[in-house]
Image (cartoon, rainbow, N blue to C red):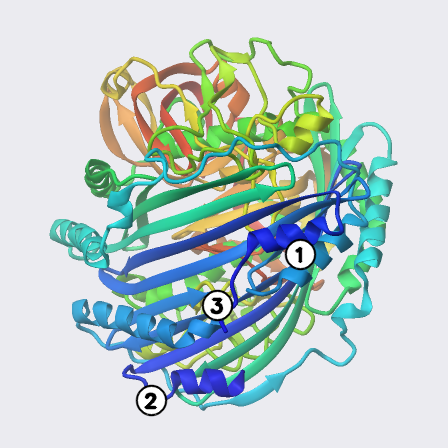
Amino acid sequence: MTAQFRPERVLERAMARCEAGEVYHRSATRTPVEFENSRLKQVRTATSEGLALRVIVGGRLGFSSTTLPGDEDGLVQRAIASAAYGDEVAFSFPGPGGTHGTETRFHHAPVEGLSVERMIDIGQDFVSRVVHYEPAALAGAGIDRESREVRLINSSGMDGAYRRTSFGAAFAIDLVEGENLLSVWESQRTSDYPESTIVALKEAAIRHLQLGRVNVPLAAGAYPVILGPHAAADLLGPFRESLNGEAVARGISPWSQRQGELAFAKSVTMTDDPLLPGGPLSAPFDDEGCPTRANNLVETGVIQDFYLDLKSAASLGRKSSGNGGRRGLEAPPSPTLSNLVLAPGHTPLADFLRDMRRGLFVVQLMGAWAGNLLAGEVSGNIVLGFLVEDGEFRGRVKDCMLSVNAFEALGTRLRGLSRETGWSDNCCLPFVVLDGVSITTRSG
Amino acid sequence: MRSLLREAVRGKAADFVEVRVEETRTTNIQFQGPTLQNLAESLSFGGSVRALVGGGWGFASFNRLDDLERHVKLAISHAETVARAVKVPARLAPVDPAVDTVPLPPDLDPASLSLREKKVILEDYNSAILGFGPPIVSSRIRYRDIHTRLYYANSDGTYLEQERLDVAGSLTAVARRDGLTQLGFRSFGGKAGYGSLKAQGPVVIERCEAARDMLAAPVVQGGEYAVVLDPELAGIFVHEAFGHLSEGDNVYENPRLQEIMTLGRRFGPPSLNVFDSGREAGSQGYMHYDDEGVPTQKTYLIKDGLLVGRLHSRETAGRMGEAVTGSARALDYRFPPIPRMRTTAIAAGEARFDEMLAEIELGVYAKGAYGGQTAGEMFTFTAGEAFMIREGKLAERVRDVTLTGNVFATLQNIDRVGDDYVIHGSAGGCGKGEQSPLPVGEGAPHIRIQKVVVGGKAG
């Protein structure tokens, strides 16, 4: 006998004992192809499926999840047990409104049709390019595709489903010269299959390797800095924390009382866009069944809106913004950003570089997520960054720490945003050009 | 289960096949301020097959056990695909097949604390934080325990059944005044049952006071300092700065890194001893067998300042002609095992804390950590709290202390190793590739390091 996951049956059983219920059903097949040390290392297939259940019993919210087929009674029992201790619920599950079937915005046939052989070719091509440039360098690559199906049903009549594809490409190079270790990497995840950006990622990795082979000294001080999309994404961490509806509801966000205030440079517009074509986290409804929409969080420097799930919205007396996300099957929904877009500027990156007399071009920071984000503090080791003099790359700077307050960075210290954009995880953003960024180095 | 799994790996057209099945019950409890954000028990069931053909690995994971034969075939077929592209065959280090059952210790009963009792303990901590009064405005409490039954079989004849209970969490007091937010943070974790959960009472008020005092503290002046790390931060330091470089998969196919990481080379002062052990009882890194069915051990990495070992899977040990260490770990059934740390530690030395301070004219005392990260020879971590050291004594509190450095220089710059060894755990765990958070332990006494770069306001 083959046990199945049956969301309707779970909801039916839950409703025999509960006032309200919601079943989230997710199944996915993911196939990663992995290269390490300039060779193909492993091919994997991960199939996964499971259910998460939320119930309301006696006005209180309960939650549980399972990946064991046939565990329907167990799932209902655990969720009800959890509700005994749960908080009183101030919201109800949303009614009908979800979309059925396949929407091309989220589901891309070229990703689903990508063969293992083709993914191996993508990685092998990168290895060949790297080895051709420098035989002693070690290339790594991870190419993967995923097809995911999400279905959400609840006792208010919501019955929505969608399919989403996901394509990931990551390229890395390690080169040891003497005691100097140089690592570069580029990665991108999209729901479509952008062939041209794969080539761009490979070229960027090799170019950064070329630029990084010469180390140059740097004295501590304040420098103009160009942050590439990966490094600039670290500046968004404090925004992510401070705009979170839960932090606002709890009064720990510095901006709880500052909605509508001009707090940043007028060129700063930050949008959460769950309907962005090709966006890695695009979806027609969130993980609580609320319809999604693009939401300007910061608009021309003004704190415009927060991102909310059902719970934080209820405690603020508002409606969900469609940002109820699950970090995994075992996590109940909480305010979660989808595709976070920092609007680009109009100036080409080349112009900013040309105008740089003496400053830094920072590709990657390390450890910058670990600071006091609610205070805006971003402090990270410049794991890959270059000294620029008179518009020319002079070499790699090492053993340097970059410290900046993100709120100042996108405020008084912001000199400009490039026209070009790039992805870093779920953030799409331009190169960010800053003035007077504090750099600490070994020499003090 | 035994016959099903042993049958699945027997007589297959592959050089090596292993299968694992896990049943995991997880309890999650979270408070955000006065709100009980989450309280839930969940069940996770799944398995995976890994196959080696020539030099290629294939892997398949699943939730439905009834299709096991199909997943074995898929893993082998993936391995064959890789083998066609790879010329060098993998050589797994030999290991004696083991057939064993490792239950939880008899005094460790996962059911000995009910969901209600766990909630009450955490609720008391939360009430203590929220009842502290201004400037403490909020709290964050995270707790989880993971009770796992693990079944493992491989084509060498190993069959293991193991049971593990990992308990971990964190307490955060949020202080806020005049637009500035500071956090008092404490994490805990272990494999010795619910003791660490119950023991946090005295810590709670101390964390509130720390968060309050940090509001008034200035941002540290950036620069190069002599630093003293408390045992928790020293443990994270050795994990980040050195542990990752010791993982065999970083070295085994990298001849130039092998030259740097040559056994016998001096990495630190004679007082420095670093080990990684699967047998530190009660620590989150405790496990009897690793996830390739290899018995764990205490592996010295640095002895008397000299590099003496590294952390291996069967593949990396086999390729380097070194002995297995029982260090292959998988986050869970969805991932293949790779060389990872277990409990990584700086062994106790002889220096007393006050002696370490006494010789410092101007320095920083850094305690606890929000987190750390490493890339190649560079590492960085953020201290939970910090104080200046002036003329041999602890002085004023400072905030936003991030330390960074180069592992080779920094290990050489350790000039005092304390006598007060402590093992620490956390719910944060360790991340490598996509496998995060893996429960690990970190052990150390206080240590003193000269010339560490501290980020902050430019001097």
The vertical placement of A438 against A4, above or below, is above
Q: Mark 1 lies on which chain?
A: B
Observer-nearest of B307 and B401: B401
Q: Where is residue B62 in the image (x, y as percent from the top left)?
A: 45, 65
For label 2, the crowd category at 10 Å Cα-Cα, with few meaning under 14, some 14 to 19 and many 20 or more, is: few
Residue under pointer 2: B11
Mark 1 touching mark 3, by CB under 8 A? no
Tell me the kind of residue under disc 1: Pro
Q: Distance between the residues labelled 1 and 3?
A: 44 Å
For label 3, the crowd category at 10 Å Cα-Cα, with few meaning under 14, some 14 to 19 and many 20 or more, is: many
Q: In this view, does B108 lie to the left or right of A270?
A: right
Q: Which chain carries label 3?
A: B
Disc 3 element = loop
User: Which label sits on residue B64?
Assistant: 3
Disc 1 element = helix
Q: Where is residue A284 in the image (x, y as percent from the top left)?
A: 45, 33
Same subunit, tags 2 and 3: yes
Residue under pointer 1: B231
Q: How far apart are marks 1 and 2 (CA)?
A: 50 Å
Mark 1 touching mark 2, by CB under 8 A? no
The residue mark sitting in front, 1 or 2, is: 2
Q: Distance between the residues labelled 2 and 3?
A: 23 Å
Q: Where is residue B256 in the image (x, y as percent from the top left)?
A: 27, 62
Q: Can residue B335 be seen in this view?
A: yes
Q: Is residue B12 left or right of residue A261?
A: left
Q: Position of residue A326 (x, y in %)?
A: 56, 43
Q: Is residue B219 visible?
A: no
Q: Earlier in the sequence, mark 2 or mark 3?
A: 2
